[in-house]
Image (tube, grey):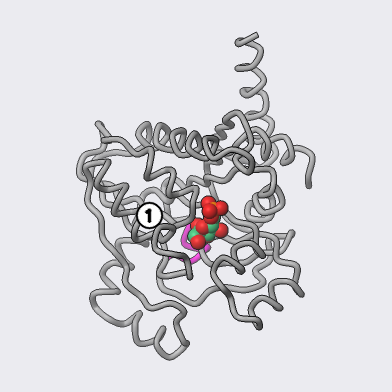
Amino acid sequence: TFINEISKFRVLESQIKDKLQLEHVIVIPGNSDAHETVKEQLGKACVQYLSSILSAEQTVAITGGTTMSEVANMMTPLAHAKNCTFVPARGGLGEQVENQANTICAEMAKKANGKYRMLYVPDPLSEESYQTIKEEPAIKEIVELIHDAAVVIHGIGDAVTMAERRKASSTVMRKIKDKHAVSEAFGYYLDKNGEVVHKVRTVGLQLDDLKNANKVITVAGGKSKTQAILSFFKQAKSDVLITDEAAANQLLKGD
Ligand code: F6P
């Protein structure tokens, strides 16, 4: 029955909450690997959650990817959170334009009737340019905004999938494979114990900075992301997980 279905999801949510020590978990039906509409529902759930916690004038830092793009797609005016600012969490990470955080945050801001700021950094960055760019006043200003963000919303990907999607060099690809990276988030590639295997050099949020945010919201679903999700939570601080049924069932089996 419908009631049984609902309580099945509430049970899943509370089991994951306990297992990953989170403040809040939302599980939506289906498997986003198999159906695009499930990813839309992840986006919708994220928008609903965001509008319940966000207050006026706050800054929201977001990452890129197709899941985050669905969050933007589902964004609505945020009635209780006027004048919010959307910023990309980190500089260029090698995504195509439609999956870039800059693009996604502009769309979110427009739909939420908020503001946005962009972070223009070439990608990939050499060590030398990185050192120079991070001292640029215009970059410094936006990086400060990013660091002060009250809310961070981000995706997680499978490490090899992400390295391929970003057309990582053969050296980076070898490192990721040899060191058995399984997850990627914020430009960090992590192994199954959550250890950092490789990091994309760019300005913006570092994993350590997550503890400064009031609320970190992770949005990741699909059975194929199970290992990636488990690995991420071994390393990073996040308060909320929004996922789908397929990933949720697998998460409870894995360690
Ligand atoms: O590249 C930005 C990013 O958020 C990554 O950090 C993450 O691994 C990926 O996108 C997730 O992408 P998708 O939602 O398309 O699986």
Q: Residue at x 34, y 58 (%)?
A: 103
Is the residue marked 1 within 8 Å of ligand 1, measured from its CB?
A: no
Q: Residue at x 30, y 35 (%)?
A: 76
Q: Residue at x 50, y 37 (%)?
A: 42
Residues packed near mark 1 inside 10 Å, few (<14), some (14 to 19) or many (20 plus): many
- 57 sits left or right of 11 in the view: left
Q: Residue at x 63, y 43 (%)?
A: 33
Q: How many marks?
A: 1
Placement of 185 over or under 163, stated as above or below: above
Q: Position of residue 49 (x, y in %)?
A: 43, 34
Q: Position of residue 93 (x, y in %)?
A: 47, 69
Q: Where, quadrant-wise, is the N terminus in this rendering?
A: top right
Placement of 8 over or under 25, stated as above or below: above
Q: Position of residue 165 (x, y in %)?
A: 56, 65
Q: Residue furthest bottom?
A: 128
Mark 1 secondary-structure assignment: strand
For the record, the magenta segment spans 205-210
Placement of 250 over or under 11, stated as above or below: below
2 drawn magenta: no
Residue situated in front as seen by the camera: 132 or 101: 101
**Main structural element of the magenta stretch: helix, strand or loop?**
helix
- 123 sits left or right of 236 in the view: left
Kind of residue at disc 1 = Ala
**Residue on which disc 1 sits:** 61
Residue situated in front as seen by the camera: 127 or 144: 127
Q: Position of residue 104 (x, y in %)?
A: 36, 54
Placement of 37 over or under 171, stated as above or below: above
- 149 sits left or right of 109 in the view: right
Quarter of the rendering containing residue 101: bottom left
